Image: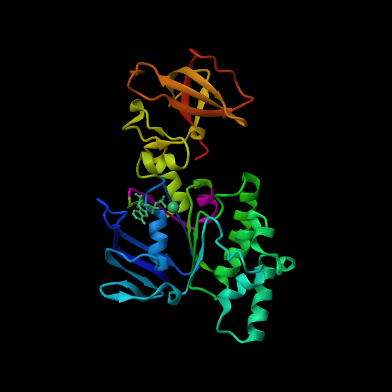
Amino acid sequence: MTCLELKGVSKRYDGAVQDALHALDLEIEEGEILGVVGASGSGKTTLLRLVAGLESPTTGELRIGGLKVAGEGAWVPPEKRGVGLVFQEGALFPHMTVEANVAYGLRGLSKEERMARLHYLLAMVNLRAAALRYPHELSGGERQRIALARALAPNPKMVLLDEPFSNLDPNLRTYLRDQLLAIIRKVNATALVVTHDTQDALVISDRLAILRDGQLVQHGPSRDVYHTPNDAYCARLFGPANALPEAWSGVAVGKGRPWIRPRELELLENEAPGTLEVQVHATQFLGDQLGVLVYPIGVDRAHEEPLLVHEDLYGHLHEVGATRWIRLRSIV
Ligand code: ADP
Ligand code: MG
């Protein structure tokens, strides 16, 4: 069943000259995790705030669980939408203990029910021992886990997470990301996760939506979006991507993909069928691999970007100026 449905949703803030979100059509199925990615200012937070009911759309309508919550005179306030929120900062109540923060989402239950659910939730995020601590006595990752427990407390129809990992150091963020994902999967929650980290988005999402300047520019299963981006913007959100070399256009290269990842190319020392002659322009040490920038022979270097090839660091040497041949790896 469809959990969230947006039809022609636009949002223009007061005094703004253009829409922060424009004519958005989007659906999320029950139990699905949708990742929303896009450059800063592309409208990701605006989308979450519209779904949460913290903003109202300028045009269009939103439905949650089939019920119209905004649009054409309909308005369901945030607390009645059955939506849980987790922000970048966690936004826990600083003067309340962990227990009180989570229990905040359980108002309306009997005392016994509340205690039982509270214990279940704290155990779920593995923080029962922290029940009586205050937010400032928790690490950043612990605060985010409590924020998720609080968001999930009332059994919402969906949870919305806005850059939930972005304030954490790299090791912790990967750990927390995997934990949050496991919890969301375990309770089979429907989730909309906004992130500017596309690696995170690929790991956690069933489907991805890409926003650019308030418009939905691509939408689909994560693997499809990664492998067949619609344009340079979509391709490059996920890291470097080469435009298909002119010499290969019209040739049935790799199922006609116009964008080629550096890892999908390889450098040969000798000519072979299906290769293109290039000259090494520069090399970059990338830690676990070597970036080799090359120009096909005869291209106008003043106006064309070089192609980037990611090579095994312990492979061949590629001196600047050397002649090589590139070929598509058969890994894809
Ligand atoms: P993102 O989360 O992708 O960085 P936002 O949704 O925060 O993007 O912002 C989208 C656009 O709307 C930006 O141009 C931003 O400046 C503008 N914007 C966001 N919030 C407001 C607001 N409260 N009032 C006016 N403009 C806003
Ligand atoms: Mg934002």
Against 11, residue 262 (above or below) is: above
The spot of residue 287 in percent (x, y) is 62, 30
Q: Is residue 185 visible?
A: no
The spot of residue 193 in percent (x, y) is 49, 58
Against 80, residue 57 (above or below) is: above
Q: Is residue 51 visible?
A: yes
Q: Residue at x 51, y 50 (%)?
A: 202
The spot of residue 242 in percent (x, y) is 41, 32
Seen from the viewer's position, the closer of residues 84 and 254 is 84
Q: Residue at x 38, y 48 (%)?
A: 41
Which span of residues is magenta-colored? 200-213
Is residue 104 highlighted in magenta? no
Seen from the viewer's position, the closer of residues 240 and 143 is 143
Seen from the viewer's position, the closer of residues 296 and 282 is 282
Residue 121 located left or right of residue 232: right
Q: How many marks?
A: 0
Q: Which quadrant of the figure contains the N terminus? A: bottom left
Farthest residue, direction front? 95
Q: Residue at x 57, y 49 (%)?
A: 167
Q: Residue at x 54, y 24 (%)?
A: 284
Residue 245 located left or right of residue 150: left
Residue 201 located left or right of residue 288: left
The spot of residue 326 in percent (x, y) is 47, 24
Farthest residue, direction right? 129
- Figure coloring: rainbow
Tell me where residue 72 sits by quadrant: bottom left
Is residue 210 highlighted in magenta? yes
